[in-house]
Amino acid sequence: MAEYAIGLDYGTNSARAIVVDCADGTILGSHVYGYAHGEMGVMGDPKDPNVARQHPADYLEGLELTVKGALAAADIDVGQVVGMGVDATASTPIPVDENGDALALMETFNDHPAAMAWLWKDHTSDGEANEITEKARAMRPAYLAKCGGTYSTEWYWSKLLRCARTAPEVYDAAYTWIELPDWIPFVLTGNQVRCLCAAGHKGLYSPEWNGFADAAFLGAVDPCLVRIRETLPDEAHHIGKAAGALTAAWAEKLGLPEGIPVAVGTIDAHAGAVGSGVKPGTMVKIIGTSTCDIAVASLDAQLPDIPGICGVAHESVLPGCYGLEAGQSAVGDIFNWFVHKVEPGNGALHDQLGEEALALKPGESGLLALDWENGNRSTLTDPKLTGLILGLSLHTSPAEIFRALVEATAFGARVIIERYREYGVPIERVVNCGGIALKSPLTMQTYADVLGCSMEISANEQSCALGAAMAGSVVGGVYPNFGEASEAMTGVMDRVYEPIPEHQVVYDRLFGLYKKLHDLFGTREYAENQFGLMKELINIREEVRNG
């Protein structure tokens, strides 16, 4: 008898549900819901580009519409659905009452920005993140060692503290705050279970510390945080465990059997890694609006603390492994900014610009860019860095700029992979997933040339949702572990992008220049005069053009 699992994927702009055949990972039905509130599902503030919020009502509407739509498309016997899994963006904490209901769903706070979900890319809490970093440096250096040396403005405690400082009426009304990948399983099961994924990478949680950051530390940052700490459980769990069983109410809404297991939630990028076959030695690049570079290592390995890497967390990606996360705060968002905000001439869109840029040779444009339009997540962990394009002339074309932006994201990716390797994390293979990986030959070939290794592509366009469905298959008893689930349900495409040696030579030179800009603007220590940098770009351009 066939067995099916449902994967729920809550991304930055939309929610998706898929119905998967557990035997081989085939997606039988899929449905997408674009969040209704705000531009592309994100509520911002025209006066403050750092604000990014979402309305929890969109999550609930998306839950019902996507699951029912995916089931209708799959046309299966729902009695054969064995489990569900959930992934979502993080850190995206939601203020809730004692029953777990989001404050924004109440009339009092329905349109209050601070009562919304604080989306991962909300950067309003930079000052608070700095406070937490400095206090940890003085009191709990071990906390910083596990999150790359700096606590991020994108993460749980900094966002809570920002709310307490700027919207005390919301903070005081909240009993606790729940991460989005924990809230959806709670909605489905009625159980408030925290996932190791978001807790370990964003919430200062570790089994070594007996749970979340201790009350004495949080109280030293600000006494208001202690109250929330007291609402958090002592233990978080990995995705191989069930958060609970589907309630009768939600079973009726979704048209599913009551009581099927719902896996503990996970971060969307981590689910993408699982759905792409991550394992020790295989790094997965999840390329979307931003990127996450996910690696794992056995719990038996002796891992050092890695500066600038977002986290080394216990069983945060796969059971039995440390999960390592790094990434870039903007990749697809940079491309979208150029296409839709700058609006280059002749109505050029992604595909046209990509084709024109692919026809250019590395170095031919004379341009060099920094990929920091939304700050730097790894390895500088600095949200106040900004983008830059160097080498512009009166002859520069839109396609040349577009290629330079793609190259900048590739150089940023190389910084990350070199940091992993520098600290002994084996990266023998790179698998990419996400729409850009599937649709942009320019990006994938550039990454192969800049990183100097093969770029494989996950066979499943919906790798994040597939990873969530795989968790559903494990808690549903189809597979005893993720190793066997991965063997059966994941794969890569036949096409592999291989490095082109002559391109590598040019990109090695350009990466050296990128590193100078990176260190000049991104570090305090670097002070070398850059009088020759623009001229070297011109030299490379002329050499390439003259053959």
Image (cartoon, rainbow, N blue to C red):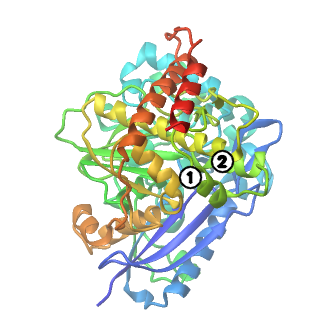
- Total marks in image: 2
Residue 84 higher or lower than 368, as above or below: below
Residue 217, how many percent across, how many down?
A: 46, 22
- Which residue is more in the foreground, 197 or 276? 276
Q: Which residue is mark 2?
A: 399
Q: Position of residue 37 (x, y in %)?
A: 75, 59
**Quadrant where the image shows the N terminus:** bottom left
Mark 1 or 2: in front is 1
**Could one spot residue 118 in this view of the protein?**
no
- Residue 168, disc: none
Q: Position of residue 178 (x, y in %)?
A: 54, 49
| Element class at badge 1 | loop
Looking at the picture, does residue 52 appear above or below residue 484? Answer: above
Which residue is drawn at the image coordinates 41% and 52% (left, top)? 270
9 and 341: which is toward the camera: 341
Which residue is pictured at 67% across the width and 66% down the height? 34
Q: Are dots 1 and 2 in contact, CB under 8 Å?
A: yes
Residue named by callout 1: 359
> Where residue 375 sits in the image (x, y, percent)?
60, 32
What's the residue type where badge 1 is placed?
A: Ala
Identify the secondary structure beneath mark 2.
helix
| Residue 177 placement: quadrant | top right
Above or below: residue 440 compared with residue 529: below
Residue 222 or residue 429, whichever sits in front: 429
* Pointer 2 local density, CA inside 10 Å: few below 14, some 14–19, many at least 20: many
Earlier along the polypeptide chain: callout 1 or callout 2? 1
